[in-house]
Image (spheres, rainbow, N blue to C red):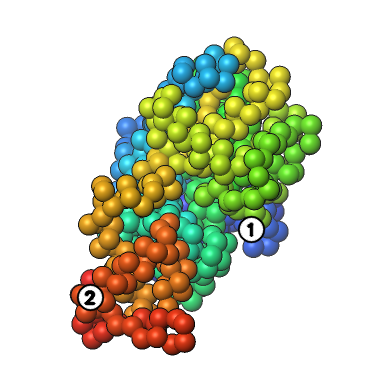
Amino acid sequence: MKITLKRKNNVKFRCTKCGRTFTRPSIRCPYCSSLVRAEIPKQKEFKLTKHPGIWKFSNYLPKIPSENIVSLDEGFTPLIKAKNFASLIKLENVFIKDETRNPTGSFRDRVATLIVSHAKHIGAKKLVCATDGNLGASVSAYSAKAGLKCVAVVPSNADYGKILQMEAFGAEIYEYGKIIDEAVVKAKELVLSEGIYEATAEENTLSIEGLKTIAYELAMQLNRIDWLVIPAGSGLTLLSTLIGFNELVNIGILKRKPKILVVQSNVCSPIVDSLKQDNVVNEKEASIVKKHIPGLDVCKTPLLKHILQYLDYANTYGVRITYTSALNYVSIVAKSEGLFIEPAGAAAFAGLAVFARKTENISKSENIVVLAPATGLKVPLTYSKEPSRRKYGSRLAGLSTKALILNVLREHGEMHGYKIWKTLGLSVSVQAIYQHLEELERAGLVESKKVGKKKLYKLTKKGYEVVLALK
């Protein structure tokens, strides 16, 4: 990472195994592949400061000067007692850690405030992150606040609502690959070739320091935490909260760590797969067709060996959940608790329900915290059918989709409608894309010709000028 430092760098990073120190915040040691952590002086007591957002925990965070802290007052999200939902699954004390209340609507704001503050501190001007949605929205928002540029590399399956957030905050967006793993590789290329600051959460160890504050807040909000139910994709949030609870036990704030229920997709479950089978519950599938749960679709997490080092196997359990169940529990949680969450978060509630029904490991009197990572407003197309989208948001959505179609044609040249639909990767039907193309052709922005049975579309001169004007 070729970043020229303009001022003294107060933050150092150390490998937890070999002890080597670094100035760049890589999450893995380049020498022994072990976990790298920011150096933070050990504290003898738990004390808050007057800084904004999660920087109130600055005694337990990297020492970034206050003038370089970039905060949107993230964190300190409410812990809500879910009486109605608890009653549905025949439990008494279920609580929701409502991360939807963060500035951009997700837990990733805890990551962004650390990463962007450090980037500003060392004099970086541009950040790049690989993201399927929430991280890109967070990093682009905090970069805008800091006056820095943000590049978001997104796979084709990224949620369009989150891409709109990134665009609103001024991020440069590049689509690359079909899944997040491929986008991560492209982001690394930009880091190495252009010297851009690495802001991908799973590649930057500062993300751990931001996310561990979830555990800190829970310790302040609830006098006894018996269970934490957490949805896991890469497992970064799981790893970070485990580290947070370890630190709290070491300080003496907690006597013991909570038991953990890890919820993963039945398509991708590398963390649950690593647990003892006696500790794992599978949801019965309604069909043999398996579908990824957005946000939980990491099938090979590079963090697995680090997560396993922190897991207490005797008190860690797992559940595999289907896409259909996750989607159903979006509705169940919304109608029982008035909280609209995205499918990845709803999977945690589905997992708790299945686990409570199929095992006797959870007693009614125990305090159970379920992490709700992000708002469902970020993924509206997941829940909406085409007619309702036309009814409530056709003008804005139509304009945005048409602009994307024009840009695809500018970048790729002649294409047929199905190929345009595949390239966009939006949650709209192929018929909707053809409808947009007909309207663009009537407006003189695209023209078409038949080649065999296929109809090829390309930009007109007027269409090209419109694309340039939009950019």
Q: Which mark is residue 442?
A: 2
Q: Which mark is residue 363?
A: none
Residues at circles 1 and 2 in contact by the CB criterion of under 8 Å: no
Position of 366 relative to 396 (above/below): above
Query: Of residues 44 and 292, which is closer to you in this image?
Result: 292
Amino acid at the residue labelled 1: Cys
Residue 47 rendering spot, x and y as whole percentages:
43, 27
Residue 86 appears left or right of 284: left
Q: What is the secondary structure assignment of the residue under circle 2?
A: helix
Q: Residue at x 50, y 40 (%)?
A: 327
Q: Which tag, 1 or 2, sits closer to the chain's start?
A: 1
Residue 213: tell me if it is visible.
Answer: no
Mark 2 residue crowding within 10 angstroms, few (<14) / some (14–19) / many (20+) = few
Residue 104 appears left or right of 191: left
Residue 185: tell me if it is visible.
Answer: yes
**Residue farthest front in this picture:** 453
Query: Of residues 66 and 89, which is closer to you in this image?
Result: 89
Position of 404 relative to 34 (above/below): below
Q: What is the secondary structure assignment of the residue under circle 1?
A: loop
Query: Of residues 240 and 248, which is closer to you in this image?
Result: 240
Q: Residue at x 40, y 41 (%)?
A: 376
Marks 1 and 2, how far apart at CA: 57 Å
Residue 187 rendering spot, x and y as whole percentages:
49, 67
Amino acid at the residue labelled 2: Arg
Q: Which residue is mark 1?
A: 29
State which quadrant residue 299 falls in.
Answer: bottom right
Q: Residue at x 28, y 80 (%)?
A: 446
Q: Quadrant of the C terminus?
A: bottom left
Q: Residue at x 43, y 48 (%)?
A: 382
State which quadrant residue 406 falls in.
Answer: bottom left
Residue 417 rendering spot, x and y as whole percentages:
41, 73
